[in-house]
Amino acid sequence: MQPDPQAIVAGLIARQRATPAQEFLKAGLAQLDRVALVSSFGADSAVLLHMIAQIDRALPVLFIDTLALFPETVAYQRDLATHLGLRNVQTLTPDREALFVRDPDGLLHRSDTESCCQLRKSEPLTRALAGYDGWITGRKRHQADTRASLQRAEVEPATGRIRLNPLADWDAPAIAAYLEAHNLPRHPLVAQGYPSIGCAPCTSRVNTGEDPRAGRWRGSEKTECGIHFTGGMAQPLRREDAA
C-alpha cells in the first residue's frame, strides 16, 4: 500500500533539504512505485533529462507534442533522447476528434489561449498521468514570481499525486554550468533569442534586458500553460508555472 503522499513529501523535504538535485531525485524515485518525468525538451530540459539518464534510462519520459511546436523542438527531442540513450520517451498528442471539434482551423490560440493550452497540453497530460503515483517537473523558483515558494516536493491538490521538482532551487548560472560541464546539446532556438520555448504561435524572441519568459504569450497576462492547475485551467489564487 502506497504511504500517505503528504508524509512522503514531508519526509523528502525534511531529510533531503540540502542534498544535491540528483541525489534528491534518486530519493524521490525510491519513494514512488510509478513515476514519470514530464519534459518539454525546451531550453533547460537537458539538465534534468541528463540526470534521469544517469539513474534510469528506462524511466518514462512524457513529451507533449501539441502539434503546434517549433520544428526545432521536435527535432531536438529526437536528437537529445538519442544522445542521452533514453529508452522510454512517450510522445503525447491532442485528441484528433477534439481538435476537429474545438479548433478545426488551428486558430484557437488567437481567441482563447487558455482553452488552446487545455486542449493541446493539459488534457493529453491528464490522460497520460492517470496511472502514475507521481511525476517530475523542471520548474525553478528563479524563473518567475509565481514560483518563488516552490518546494522540491509537493502533493498535487486534485489527484494526490506527488510532484518532484529537483531543480527548484537552481538559478540560471547553475543551469548553464551544468550544461557546459556535461557538454549537453542546447536547444537550437536558444542561440536565436528564445530562452523560453513553447508553441510556435505563442512564443517570440526575447530582447536584451527582458525577462526570459517575456516571449511567452507576449502581449497578454497569461504566464503559464496550465498543466500544473486543477483541470488544466488557471485557478484563482493558485498560479503555478509550466514544466
Image: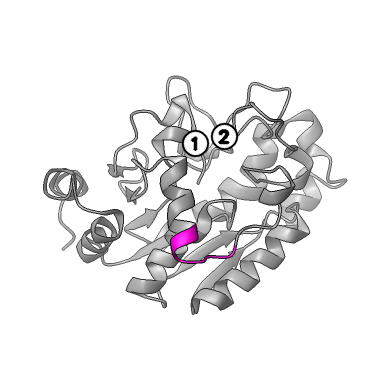
The relative height of residue 133 versus residue 33 in the rendered view (above or below) is above
Tell me if residue 65 comes above or below residue 151 in the rendering.
Answer: below
Locate residue 12, reporting x and y percent. Answer: 18, 49
Image point 48% across, 34% down: which residue? 143
Quarter where residue 47 is shown: bottom left
Quadrant showing the N terminus: bottom left
Which residue corresponds to mark 2? 224
- The dominant secondary structure in magenta is loop
CA separation in Å, label 1 and label 2:
5 Å
Neighbour class for label 1 at 10 Å: few (<14), some, many (≥20)? Answer: many
User: Magenta span covers which residues?
Assistant: 180-185
Q: Which residue is mark 1?
A: 241
In this rendering, position of residue 134 left or right of residue 185: left
- Answer whether residue 212 is magenta in the image: no
Using the rendered view, name the quadrant where residue 237 is placed.
top left
User: Residue 229: percent from the left, percent from the top?
Assistant: 47, 36
**Numbered marks: total:** 2
